[in-house]
Image (tube, rainbow, N blue to C red):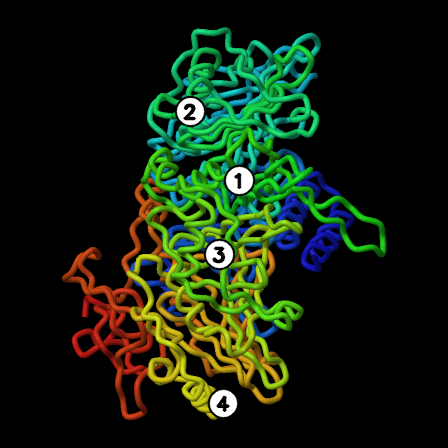
Amino acid sequence: FFSCVFVLSRRCNGYFLKSTGRQLVTLELNWMVHFGKFLEKVSDNHRQSDHNEVNQDLLSKSVLQNGERVEMSFKVGRDSTVFTTHRILLIDVQGISGKKVEYKSIPYSSIQQFAVQTSGGGWDADSELFIVTSAIDRPIKVDFVKGKVDVFAVQGLVASKVLGGQPLPAAPPGQQGPGGGSTSVSTWFTDNHVQVDAAAVEQQLRTGVAVLLQDEHVELAFQLGRDSFCLTSKRLLHIDTKGFSGKRIQFTSVPYHAIGAFSVETAGGGFDRDAEMKIWTRQPAHGFPIKLDLRKGMADVFAVQAVLMARVVGGGGRPRSSTGRGLYTPTSQSAGSFLAWLGQDSVQIDAQQVEQHLRATVPILHADEQVELAYRLGRDTTIFTTHRILFIDVQGWSGKRVEYLTVPYTSVAAFSLTTAGGAFDFDAEFKIWTKVWPPPPPEGDEGSPPPPPPPGKHFLAQDLRKGRTDPMAIQALLAHKLTGHDQSHKACMAALAVPSSQQQWAGGTGFLDLLKGHASQVDPQGAEGLLRQSAPVLLPEEHVRVAFKLGRDSVVLTTHRILMIDVQGMSGKRVQYTTLPYRSVRSFEVESAGSFDGDSELKIWTQMPWLSKLKMEFRNDSVDIFTIQAWLATMVVDSRSQGPAVIPSNPLGVKQFLGWLAGASQVHPTELEKQLRALVPLLLPNESVVMAFKSGRDTLMCTSLRIVVIDVQGISGKRVAYQTIPYSTIRTFAVESAGSLDPNEDMRIWTDIPMKPVLREDFKKGKVDLQAVQHQLMERFLQRPGRTAAVTSVAPALAAAPVVPLSQPASQPPSQQPSHSGRCQRQSSKGACRHHAVGGSQFCSLHSCPACGAEKASGDKGCARHPTGHRNH
């Protein structure tokens, strides 16, 4: 700013001394150049930097993983945004000295939505990139200097990592993308989209702007004025043209795997001129629907439903064309009595007839999709197919406006079935909790607590008419779908067809335990036998492993799920069976009893805001918390194992372990694992401790399967909580070095758990290798299944030269480089080096030769073969 003022004053003085037109032009040009640079600094806009230099710098600091390299990098001031083969790395240099640096990692597998926006005209001096992840964290925004960054190259890189594939080469300058056409004035005023030729739109997206991937195709396209909406083979693509000039265009991408539910709605009669498409995503705080109005008679809503069904739900074959007129009408089956309709209770109808009726009237079912259960309430129908739950809502007097809501089974996080009671209790009930994030809560009055968020499509419930429905059929079908077993529903129901009984469990809790809310452990085999006799709840191949009882209520841990049984009413006939699949458990904690607090606890956290936490208390001598911990760890963290080695805990061993932990100032991973194996049955048989950190009496350890936090509480230290955070819940993470005035280093982890969105751990300066911490966390993402497409290199498509780390030997191609992980192998008189090894070498950046990667002394430039550190010597 001061340079601008200085130049302006100097030029003004020269102008007044020698008033010529040439000096006036020089004054204006110089002022504009300096003012433009000033705006770049103030507006926090990034410029592209040399990714090869950034790659070498990050390798020297041991930031990159083995085999990881930088593909794009951008810089603003001292901060950088780096795109590697594995992640987006945000580097934030803080403080006057710049010693405090935060490295925040966003793995590509965590990205749920992304968008790029081109720069506009006039004073609009920046283009933008938006990233939304599955972490409960604010979206990420990166601004770029106008004209200095190719945002479509950035978009292509992110799309290739998130969706899989190769980006297109850069489009020639001056080309225009879609949005140049026009629709009718009436359509524009009513905000209704019309269907346009998908092939023509695809051609524009390939030649006008390089937005699509090489193997990506546009399947459906809609246009409203200058805006477009496309359903491609990999994503939803919304193109929003802004401003009078139309130069500012935003391209928003939503991958199909981020969609939790969708619906299509046909147009009604009379003045109802539009059909609708709605999409609900799984993004935290972004689950409210994406809505698209479609012009009546100018868009095929069933074609939209077919594409979404194929891409989101899956299944073979498109829907067969119907012989009817495309209007759903209820079948002629009786929908129940007037009391059932008045009480909003559904009745069960024949599934085969419903399937035949749907195939004859509307093209809604896929070729390989079958109806397994169906329920009717008035004109509305709820259908359970082999692929999804389909809610059909007939609206309006004419019944022409019909909504078809699809909830895939993969989006169902939990469900419950409640049987009907006696006397005047005429209805049963089923509820489902989905992975769709609820809309934001409404604004409350000032000074009062905020109101709860509306359920949206996160929570769905329906009443069932007593005597006209079989609620256990829904329970069996959903249990079969959500636990991932291949047994057909009919065979499953035949095996579960046992007479209902009101037999109660033996061995209930005492009266004092009932008053205090303390559950007690019961024999799992006896619990399984009683469950199979009382109601058809368990699947044929399902077995009880751990069971608890509190009064008439029970919690059962089976080989398939967590089953909560709530007996209600005076007669006990009304029973609620709630199923929580193990895949919906995001974190859990077992807590031992203390000196003055005689109960132990079990806490379970989910990713569902409306069912976010479960808690159980036990009498101290009635439950072995390590048995519970072992089973949950096996099913939640490492379900591929054959089962835990359930070893009863020894109170004396636990006491010895806590005494050893209290006396240790620092914890070595090998010694900690040795103590745990000998004294506390906390680790699984195939689990090892990789890193461990101690803070006061508490300990955080990173194992090969999870993060475990050991929290010692109370004055006596007898009450200890063992919390498990699986790596699968971690979405983004950051490590931050210490500064000149701030002596602490820290690690932060963002999860998808509503009640535990952030985990933070502080370290003393110099006591922890931060890069080793972030390497360990990053390795967990690389070991997740299904990430092959996310690590595809796109360097050839971006016309960037491949980066060969200086630590690679010249005699070996990169694909044959030895893979080493962990710390540097350098041994000296001072001991072993504590730094992390760089990619392609056994040694860190200080002890590896830049020319060949061989061992060298920290004070030397290279090894004995390359003393100057260059290959030409």
Residue drawn at point x = 40 percent, y = 68 percent: 630
In depth, the one of 161 and 440 nearer the eye is 440
Q: Earlier in the sequence, mark 1 or mark 3?
A: 1
Going from N to C along the chain, the mark reached first, 1 or 2, is 1
| Residue at disc 3, secondary structure | strand
Q: CA distance from mark 3 to mark 2?
A: 37 Å
Q: Which is nearer the N-term, disc 4 or disc 1?
A: 1
Which residue position is annotated with label 3? Answer: 585
Q: Is residue 629 left or right of residue 121?
A: left
Which callout, 3 or 4, points at the residue further toward the start of the chain?
A: 3
The residue where tag 4 is placed is 662
Circle 1 residue = 115
Q: Nearer the viewer, mark 1 or mark 2?
A: 2
- The residue mark sitting in front, 3 or 2, is 3
Where residue 243 appears, as percent x and y from the top left, is: 66, 29
Number of the label disc, if any, that sits on residue 218: 2
Q: Residues within 10 Å of mark 3 (few under 14, many from 20)?
A: many
Q: Which of the pair 700/475 is nearer the observer? A: 475
Q: How far separated are the C-alphas under marks 1 and 2?
A: 18 Å
Q: How many angstroms separate mark 1 from mark 3 (CA)?
A: 31 Å
Q: Residue furthest left?
A: 811
Tell me the mark number nearer the camera, choosing from 4 and 1.
Answer: 4
